[in-house]
Amino acid sequence: MTATTAIDRGLSTELASDLATDLAAAAFTLAKRFAAGATMWSIAPSWEPHALHIAVEFVHPVIMGKRALPAVALTGPDLVDLVRVSVRPGDIVVAVSGADDPDVRSVMRRSPAWGATTIWIGSGERPRMGLADHVLWLDDPDPRVPATGGFVLFYHLLWELTHVCFEHSGLLKPEGAEPVCITCSDEGRLGEVVTASISGQAAVRTARGVEDVVTTLIDPVGAGELVLVHAGTAISRLGDEEVGLA
């Protein structure tokens, strides 16, 4: 029996099986990222106490012998810029919001370029499929849901199940390299333009760091735009509808 299967069985009596599976998968991902040295960044633009609570939950374990995990709440204005300068490749971003929150949507879209894993907690209408790595969602449209304790249950379970995964350390070993292009040993990667293109080149941030990328195929490009990078070249510009498939 795998760790995720065991977790799923333990949750199934309290939650719908699909949500239990989502929680198990998210916790397993968290454990792998933390084991590799990640920091968790939590955001909740409309409900900042949730962001603070998540950080406290992971930094200050309430059970003797459980490890403290690096977690920081990011709050205040200019949230996208704040996450951008804080997150590093391999880190985790956890957001609590509705699917229509513009700051969270922007963070989720850009996180692959920053090399961050994303978890989105919310309720009501769901975000578009693929916009976050893990979505933990209550379909109840009642606007009072954020205050009823369901979200708190989610991140309490995430904390507890992450530590369950730590007990199976063999599952947390680094995974093998992802498939790449057999011709040029590179894959299409999301990038965020750091500096506007000059003479057919621009600095672009990807999960590998800031790279000098050839932009002649799509010039001009401006800072903040999202592009697809392949073999050191920006081959297309991505709009909202192209980040996270419907």
Image: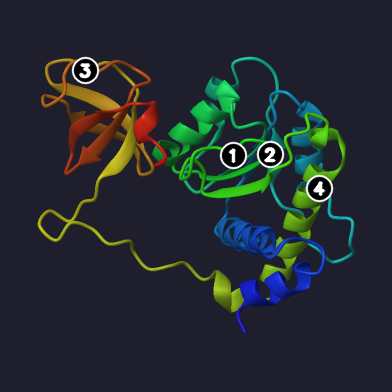
Rendered image quadrant of residue 230: top left
**Can see residue 173?**
yes
Q: Tell me what residue is drawn at x 77 percent, y 54 percent.
A: 68
Quadrant where the C terminus is found in the figure = top left
Mark 3 or mark 2, which is nearer the start of the sequence?
Answer: 2
Q: Tell me what residue is drawn at x 82 percent, y 50 percent.
A: 153
Q: Secondary structure at mark 4?
A: helix
* Amino acid type of the residue that numbered disc 3 sits on in the rendered structure: Ser
Mark 4 or mark 2, which is nearer the start of the sequence?
Answer: 4
Q: For mark 4, what is the residue?
A: 57
Residues packed near mark 4 inside 10 Å, few (<14), some (14 to 19) or many (20 plus)? some
Q: For mark 3, what is the residue?
A: 197
* Amino acid type of the residue that numbered disc 2 sits on in the rendered structure: Gly
Q: For mark 1, what is the residue?
A: 126
Q: How many marks?
A: 4
> Mark 2 touching mark 1, by CB under 8 A?
yes
What scheme was used to colour the molecule? rainbow
Q: Secondary structure at mark 3?
A: loop
Please identify, in this view, whether the residue under mark 2 or under mark 3 is nearer the observer. Answer: 2
Q: Secondary structure at mark 2?
A: strand
**How far is the residue under mark 2 from the one under mark 1?**
8 Å
Q: Secondary structure at mark 1?
A: loop
Q: Tell me what residue is drawn at x 62 percent, y 84 percent.
A: 1
**How far is the residue under mark 2 from the one under mark 4?**
18 Å
* Amino acid type of the residue that numbered disc 1 sits on in the rendered structure: Arg
Q: For mark 2, what is the residue?
A: 122
Residues packed near mark 3 inside 10 Å, few (<14), some (14 to 19) or many (20 plus)? many
Q: Position of residue 83 (x, y in %)?
A: 56, 29
Check the image and report above or below for 245 versus 4: above
Q: Nearer the viewer, residue 118 or 56?
A: 118
**How far is the residue under mark 1 from the one under mark 4?**
25 Å
